[in-house]
Image (spheres, rainbow, N blue to C red):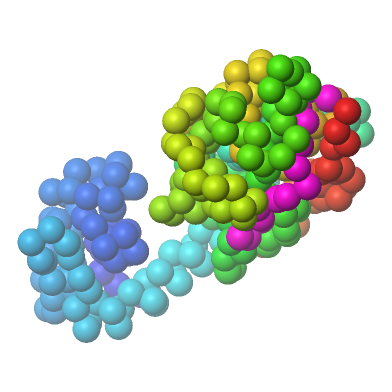
Amino acid sequence: MYDLPPLNGLRAFEAAARNLSFAKAAEELHVTPAAISYQIRSLENTLKVKLFRRLNRAIVLTEAGALMYPGVKNSFEGLRRAVDRIEDSARTDNVVIATISPHMAAKWLVPRLTLFIERHPEIDLRIAASNTTVDLTTDKADIAIRYNLGNNDGLVAEKLMDEAVTPMCSPALYHGDQPIRTPGDLRHHTLIHDETLIRHWPGSSGWSEWLALAGVPEFDYSAGLHFDHSDHCVDAAIAGSGVVLGRRSMSSRDLEQGRLIAPFDLDLPFRGGIYSVTTPVKAANPNVQAFRRWLREEASGMELNSPRS
């Protein structure tokens, strides 16, 4: 018999210590912050030691809390792995749930899915398009396709592709009344701004870095069209509304099929890359293996450069 404090208290402690927030722990466990606070106080009374120091707008672990946290965290992770093994062994369906950003789903994955369906009609692939960070050990998703810096400790991760941005426009704009032949010609056109780039390069607009790399004298690059969804930026460029600082991999199909042109052989690379990520348990699933293998093949076969015509 294990002489342990109540499991609810330990669960509340683990979530609060990991998030360093009672409010976030409450949101994660679907209870109120008051309930978390009560569970922590009860646990502290049971152990006869303080686990957190309450500050004005934050909490921090005490020395005792910091000593206790790794063991509790590892125990819950072990329980999660054990449950995963049971669920996977009992699972008789062929469902694979993949989470991916909406832009990558629309511009990269969906146009290629027919190839996967033809090869693996037995797999029930379900796409969850979201930018929300997922915990693959607790969420239902089997695999995540995400841009990250390669920080995937404890997970099975494979880099699918690098990413870079470069100006892109419609063929009509490229050949129009004010043709685009040098980076300086961009001053005569509407620039399309992808606000999501700011999240990849904090403090940078994207365009400012590329224009500096191209040696273009300063001008008011902040004007133009601004979108908070990447696929809207690309669609506006295809429609001829302006020039977008487009992502090479995400726009590869539009470049290949001539809807977009990349006028300059000058790319600004992202740090990190686009990865497929799963857990060691889920990586053993043959259906997940088949999907990851197909992703790898599709990514390795991409032609990112598009000839100007």
Q: Residue at x 56, y 53 (%)?
A: 212
Query: Taking 107 as reference, is 49 left or right?
Result: left
Q: Position of residue 23 (x, y in %)?
A: 22, 50
Q: Decide: is 190 above or below 140.
A: above
Q: Position of residue 288 (x, y in %)?
A: 75, 47
Q: Quadrant of the N terminus?
A: bottom left
Q: Nearer the viewer, residue 53 or 284?
A: 53
- Indicate yes or no whether the magenta region holds residue 1: no
Q: Nearer the viewer, residue 18 or 31?
A: 18
- Indicate yes or no whether the magenta region holds residue 276: yes
Q: Position of residue 84 (x, y in %)?
A: 59, 54
Q: Residue at x 74, y 18 (%)?
A: 176
Query: Taking 231 as reference, is 286 left or right?
Result: right
Residue span colored magenta: 258-277
- Magenta stretch prevailing secondary structure: loop
Query: Taking 106 as reference, is 264 left or right?
Result: right
Q: Nearer the viewer, residue 190 or 77?
A: 190
Q: Residue at x 63, y 29 (%)?
A: 243
Q: Which image quadrant is residue 181 in?
A: top right
Q: Decide: is 95 above or below 114.
A: below
Q: Residue at x 85, y 33 (%)?
A: 308
Q: Position of residue 145 (x, y in %)?
A: 65, 46
Q: Does the rendering let one see residue 87?
A: no
